[in-house]
Image (cartoon, grey):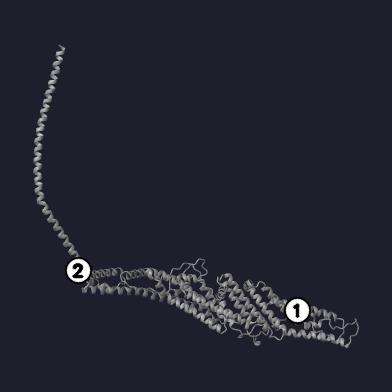
Amino acid sequence: MVHTEDASSRKREIEEKLKQEQETLSFIRENLEKSDQQTKGMVSILSSFESRLMQLENSIIPVHKQTENLQRLQENVDKTLSCMDHVISYYHVAKDTDRIIREGPTGRLDEYLACIAKIQKAVEYFQDNNPDSPELNTVKARFEKGKELLEAEFRSLLTRYSKPVPPILILDAIGVDEELEVQEDVVLEHLPEAVLQDIICIAGWLVEYGRNQDFMNVYFQIRSNQLDRSIKGLKDHFRKNSASSGILYSPAVQTKRKDTPTKKAPKRPGTIRKAQNLLKQYSQHGLDGKKGGSNLTPLEGKDDVLDIEIDSYIHCISAFVKLAQSEYALLAEIIPEHHQKKTFDSLIQEALDNLMLEGDNIVSAARRAIMRHDYSAVLTIFPILRHLKMNKSEFDATLQGTAASTKNKLPTLITSMETIGAKALEEFADSIKNDPDKEYNMPKDGTVHELTSNAILFLQQLLDFHETAGAMLASQETSSSASSYTSEFNKRLLSTYICKVLGNLQLNLLSKSKVYEDSALSAIFLHNNYNYTLKSLEKSELIQLVTVTQKKAENSYRELIEQQIQMYQHSWLKVTEHLTSRNMPVFQPGAKLKDKERQVIKDKFKGFNDGLEELCKIQKGWAIPDKEQRDFIRQAQRRVVSEAYRAFLHRCANISFTKNPEKYHKYRPEEVEEMIEKLFDTSA
């Protein structure tokens, strides 16, 4: 029973599910039918839409193409109008730029160059498109006028603003202020910065667009003139200021820089001028017998001017180098690189030629002086030549890249100076050897001869310029050993030369000494000259140069001096020989002398007295300038004579040889010593 109920229940569930499934299936079928209907409707709509799109496309495409063509036509019209405006503008360029071109570029260079650029474009247009048109000639003429005015502006700016560099600024630049431990680097500004930029701009345009190189000639001519005027201004500054005040700076400039002490004039070769004056005056003045030195006075006025000229030339050489360097720096900003060296070469020619001409004139003056046997002229060359050689490397560096003829000018001048200098040195040495023995030219007091003082003065100048003088002599050497021209070689050459002059002097003095009739005066003369020479050598340190080739020079002079002292002392033998025991009678104390024996003693006293008086009278007028030597010779002679006289008096003390002993015994030993102490003293 139970199973039947379960089966019925189960059956009812299945039937219900089946019914539900059937309902679901019916629903699905209905939906499928609806979907099919909708799909058919959609397909129909799409087909209709496609048909309409095709119709629209067939209508729009022709319209689009027409629109595109119209747009292209519009663009072409715009471009054509623009080109027409551009072309038409070229026809108006001449008119539009007329006022600006006529008024020139002064004060508005940028605007002017923009105007020129318009004209240049118009020229290019007409040349390319209508070369036969009258407009081309018009704009060409306008372009040439514009270029001409730019060239004129270039010249005008350079001329207006190029000024000579003030002498004070040049002296600062070359560093003559020895009081400053570190020299300031002075920058020479030749043109105001704004003007310089305009000039650079114009030069650049003329090179790039103007196809013009004439402005380079204008540039070097104007700057060359200013360079030359700057150097001449420095010369005038030396003449005006140095001659009047001895300084190179005006008071106004001295107070300009508060941190700079009062300017000090650079060293000038005043000692050279003094020596030249002395060397020129052999017989115009007397000699001071008391002091034994030359009392020659330098001819200040004329020779001070020459000092200034020498000093001026030396500073102008330095100024040229500094100014040329600054000119090249300026030129490098304005002139195209491949034209710079040539333009610089042209720019410096006038100033350089004037300097070289002045140097040649110095050489010519020295040559003429040497022909007149005035060898002091070589002293003018020494400071100049030394300065030229010291600055040669910087000079060469400044002229690097210039023509060979330009670079060779300074070496040629140096060679000329060395040649004439060496000639003067050699002829001076010969003149010392051959100076004639003129009696009227001999110092009557036996003091130092002018020839000696002149020779020593000359040699002392060589000491100040020993390297220059050595190189002078070396420049004339042709031996293989001279090829290197080392400093040591030059030093030996100069030492040999000095020894040659001293040797010639010694030979000449020996010859001159024979003019004196009195051999004692001859000895004093040689003593004074040898002593003066030795002391001068030692005092001036010339002896160091001498001993390079003659190690025993000092000893040789000392021996010569000692020989002359002995020769002088020999002159007193005719006085002291009367005091010797020779011919002295032998007698017993208290014994009466014979007349002959008394006469011998009388003669001895008389011979001594007369000889003493004569020598003291003569030798009192002689001179020994060196106090040390004078005292030494006096004391030595006083000692010898006094000892001999005292011994003689002692021998004659107890001898009765005359009734009037005071007639013969005229001088006490102390009086004799006093008389000898007054030797070589014209004031006694």
- In terms of image quadrants, where is residue 668? bottom right
**Which image quadrant for residue 556?**
bottom right
In the rendered picture of this protein, how many numbered marks are placed on residues? 2
What's the distance in space between the residues labelled 2 and 1, CA to CA? 122 Å
Residue 129 position, x and y percent, is 21, 69
Q: Amino acid at mark 2?
A: Ile
Residue 6 is situated, as x and y percent measured from the top left of the image, at 15, 15
In the rendered view, tell whether residue 118 sits above or below residue 282.
above
Quadrant (top left, top right, bottom left, bottom right) of the C terminus: bottom right
* Crowding at mark 1 (Cα within 10 Å: few <14, some 14-19, many 20+): some
Tell me if residue 33 comes above or below residue 644 in the rendering: above
Is residue 66 shown left or right of residue 355?
Answer: left
Pointer 2 or 1: first along the chain = 2
The picture places residue 624, in percent across and down from the top left corner, at 69, 80
Position of 60 compared to 414: left or right? Answer: left
Does dot 2 land on a helix, a strand or a loop?
helix
Displayed quadrant of residue 142: bottom left
Label 2, on which residue?
Answer: 88
> Residue 522, can we see it?
yes
Q: Are marks 2 and 1 in contact (CB under 8 Å)?
A: no
| Residue 594 higher or lower than 411, as above or below | below
Would you name the residue on which mark 1 appears? 637
Bin the neighbour count of mark 2 within 10 Å (Cα to Cα): few under 14, some 14-19, many 20 and up: few
If the image is split into quadrants, where does the N terminus sit?
top left
* Front position among marks 2 and 1: 2
* Residue depicted at 66% across the width and 77% down the height: 532
Considering every residue shown, the one lying at the far top of the view is 1
Q: Amino acid at mark 1?
A: Gln
Residue found at x 10% / y 30%: 29
